[in-house]
């Protein structure tokens, strides 16, 4: 009886020692007897003393990750389950050993490498199958293990570009814009270059502009130009992006207004704003065109924008021409109404009788509207004419300038002719003489411009 008791005690002591001795199982792993290593580990894991130390879990990580790569298990649901359990074991190990004191042992390093490889492969497979949510979750795991291997200097590179670009593209395709930006940012901040990587910087430029982060927008636009100097994409400025990233008229106005809110004297923003509104208020195909209900509001906004751009570049005639041309186009529409009313009035009025007071009043109102609208072109055309005259004095008037100059002087002569008629109707002889002189002046100027 005494002898039996001693045997039981000896066995218990022996088992207690074995319960915390990981070398037998580690030896099996090194001998590549992975099935037996897993079987012995699973049996040992039923003993609380065996799992009382961190090493039990990093050992499980290495064995399960290795078994998942064996022939017959690789690329199967069983392999995926093994990898998941290996990852859970490593998470437990990190909780028990935050310093990761065993990470440099080759057997354990190899387990982490295989976990990284598995998650990368699984993520790539899910990406190809367009399962972007699943792919992204697996690639996040791959990045975690990649970062760990880099930190531990197991991987010699400072950045795992392969897994980061795949994660970024997966996140972008799956609609996870913020996560995509985070991965692209790591790549861009490292100034990765070469074929296929220009999109990294393009994404961040667009992303930061959309977030109204102008500092980030400029940073990645400049980085993109530095890494890809031959690309024209990074020459575009914030105004180009404001207009180019949206489609509707209202969206474009809003986008440019946002640029001007922080940069009110931006020449290009003001000029583009004016041109966009101009195209809306002056449709090329007038027939059947419906002008916006807030025409007057938009007209003021357009004139203000062109006025601001003209102040920034006082030697630049284009914004002035836009304003003048707008009023000429507007006056042309009023003139059509005048002519139509004149025809209708003639048809309604019997020969030898006077037109009705209503018709006469409407005629006079349309005449005034026409004259006033034409006069709206006078000031901007005068300013443009001054610019052209200055260029002519310096011998810098080009062929295109001459055509615009002739157009401006022709309209100025016509405008002053209308003012002369108005002064004559009002029996204001002094004004009539003054406007007549101006009419002649601009008519003579027109004749003096050589083609």
Image (cartoon, helix red, strand yellow):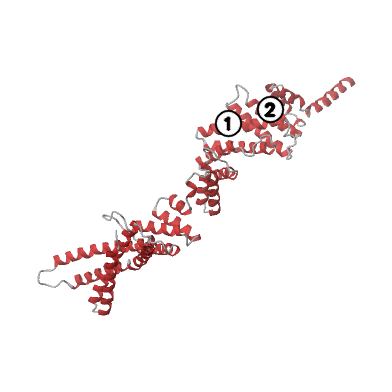
Q: For the view shown, which residue lies furthest in the left direction?
A: 352
Residue at 76%, 34% in the rendered image: 53
Relative side of 274 to 263, left or right: left
Pointer 2 and pointer 1: residues touching (CB < 8 Å)? Answer: no
Residue at 25%, 68% in the rendered image: 366
Q: Residue 241: horizontal and vertical position, in percent?
A: 46, 51
Q: For the view shown, which residue lies furthest in the right direction?
A: 2
Q: Under tag 1, what secondary structure?
A: helix
Disc 2 versus disc 1: distance between alpha carbons? Answer: 19 Å
Residue 70 shows up from this direction: yes
Q: Residue 144: horizontal and vertical position, in percent?
A: 63, 38
Find residue 15 and report its image quarter.
top right
Q: Residue 91: horizontal and vertical position, in percent?
A: 68, 37
Asked whether 289 or 78 is in front, the reply is: 289
Asked whether 214 or 411 is in front, the reply is: 411
Q: Does 137 sit above or below residue 275?
A: above
The residue labelled by disc 1 is 121
The residue labelled by disc 2 is 63
Q: Residue 301: horizontal and vertical position, in percent?
A: 40, 63
Q: Does 54 sit above or below residue 180?
A: above
Residue 428 shows up from this direction: no
Residue at 62%, 26% in the rendered image: 69
Q: Quadrant of the C terminus?
A: bottom left
């Amino acid at each position: 009886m005494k002898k039996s008791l001693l045997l039981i005690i000896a066995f218990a002591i022996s088992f207690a020692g074995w319960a915390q001795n990981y070398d037998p199982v580690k030896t099996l792993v090194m001998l590549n007897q992975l099935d037996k290593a897993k079987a012995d580990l699973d049996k040992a894991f039923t003993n609380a003393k065996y799992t009382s130390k961190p090493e039990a879990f990093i050992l499980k990580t290495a064995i399960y990750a290795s078994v998942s790569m064996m022939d017959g298990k690789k690329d199967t649901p069983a392999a995926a389950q093994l990898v998941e359990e290996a990852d859970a074991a490593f998470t437990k190990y990190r909780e028990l050993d935050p310093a990761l004191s065993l990470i440099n042992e080759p057997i354990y390093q190899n387990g982490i490498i295989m976990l990284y490889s598995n998650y990368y492969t699984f993520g790539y497979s899910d990406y190809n199958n367009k399962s972007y949510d699943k792919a992204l979750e697996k690639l996040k795991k791959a990045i975690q293990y990649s970062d760990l291997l880099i930190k531990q200097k197991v991987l010699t590179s400072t950045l795992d570009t392969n897994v980061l670009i795949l994660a970024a593209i997966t996140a972008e395709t799956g609609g996870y814009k913020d996560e995509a930006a985070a991965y692209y940012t790591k790549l861009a901040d490292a100034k990765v270059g070469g074929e296929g990587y220009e999109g990294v910087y393009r994404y961040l430029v667009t992303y930061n502009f959309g977030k109204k982060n102008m500092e980030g927008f400029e940073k990645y636009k400049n980085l993109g130009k530095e890494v890809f100097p031959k690309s024209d994409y990074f020459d575009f400025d914030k105004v180009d992006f404001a207009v180019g990233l949206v489609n509707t008229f209202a969206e474009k106005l809003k986008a440019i207004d946002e640029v001007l809110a922080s940069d009110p004297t931006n020449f290009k923003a003001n000029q583009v704003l004016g041109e966009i509104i101009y195209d809306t208020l002056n449709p090329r195909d007038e027939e059947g065109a419906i002008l916006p209900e807030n025409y007057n509001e938009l007209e003021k906004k357009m004139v203000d924008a062109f006025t601001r751009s003209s102040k920034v570049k006082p030697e630049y005639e284009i914004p002035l021409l836009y304003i003048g041309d707008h009023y000429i186009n507007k006056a042309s529409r009023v003139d059509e109404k005048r002519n139509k009313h004149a025809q209708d009035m003639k048809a309604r009025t019997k020969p030898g009788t006077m037109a009705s007071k209503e018709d006469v009043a409407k005629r006079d109102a349309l005449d005034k509207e026409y004259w006033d609208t034409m006069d709206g072109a006078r000031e901007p055309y005068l300013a443009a004419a001054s610019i052209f005259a200055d260029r002519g004095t310096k011998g810098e008037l080009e062929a295109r300038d001459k055509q615009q100059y002739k157009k401006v002087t022709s309209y100025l002569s016509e405008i002053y002719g209308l003012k002369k008629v108005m002064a004559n109707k009002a029996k204001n002889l002094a004004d009539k003489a003054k406007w007549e002189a101006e009419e002649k002046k601009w008519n003579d100027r027109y004749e003096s411009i050589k083609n």
